[in-house]
Amino acid sequence: MVKVPRDSSLEASSVNAPVKVSGVAGEQEVSVVAGDVSVKGSRGNLEVAAVSGNVELVPESLADTEVSTVSGNVKLKLPKGAGANVQFSSVGGTFNGRDVSLGSSSKKYGNGEHDVEVSTVGGALDVQSE
């Protein structure tokens, strides 16, 4: 476990191990080769790259977010009242249960204030909003 001050920026990477980030308010950049990523209670801009692993995002407040996976699912739980413009592109995946093979899809939540871009080769995006 590594602890950093809440307002710090964070850059973390791993091979064959999960990465869990909690309560970081600065910019965050996470990359994994084989392992799951969990980011909870975040407040800053977020960039996640995963070759093989699932990504779970539960931000305290939403900021611009970019996620890319090769084979892994992405779950995003939007904070209450968050505005997001979610763009999803995939070779063979689903966005909230709808097939998006070889294409892209987008959905606006609230005022669409923050950009959320998710791309997968073979994975699903599930966005939950309150």
Image: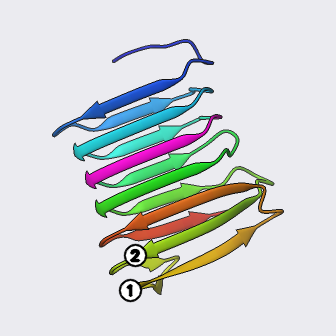
Colour treatment of the image:
rainbow
Residue shown at 42% from the left, 46% from the top:
48
Where is residue 14, by image quadrant?
A: top left
Label 1 neighbour load within 10 Å: few <14, some 14-19, many 20+ = some
Q: Which amino acid does label 1 sit on?
A: Ser
Residue shown at 34% from the left, 70% from the top:
123
Cα–Cα gap, marks 2 and 1: 6 Å
Residue sitting nearer the eye, 37 or 130: 37
State the SS at label 2. strand
Residue shown at 30% from the left, 47% from the top:
36
Q: In this view, does 108 lie to the left or right of 127?
A: right
Residue shown at 37% from the left, 16% from the top:
2
> Is residue 49 on the magenta stretch?
yes
Q: Residue 90 carries which label?
A: 2
Q: In this view, does 31 lie to the left or right of 58?
A: left
Q: Earlier in the sequence, mark 2 or mark 1?
A: 2
Residue 40 visible to the viewer: yes
Magenta residues, start to end: 43-52
Q: In the image, is residue 77 above or below residue 90?
A: above
Taken as a whole, is the magenta stretch helix, strand or loop?
strand
Q: In which quarter of the image is the N terminus?
A: top left
Q: Which mark is residue 101?
A: 1
Q: Do the residues labelled 2 and 1 touch (CB within 8 Å)?
A: yes
State the SS at label 1. loop
Residue 69 image point, x, y percent: 34, 59
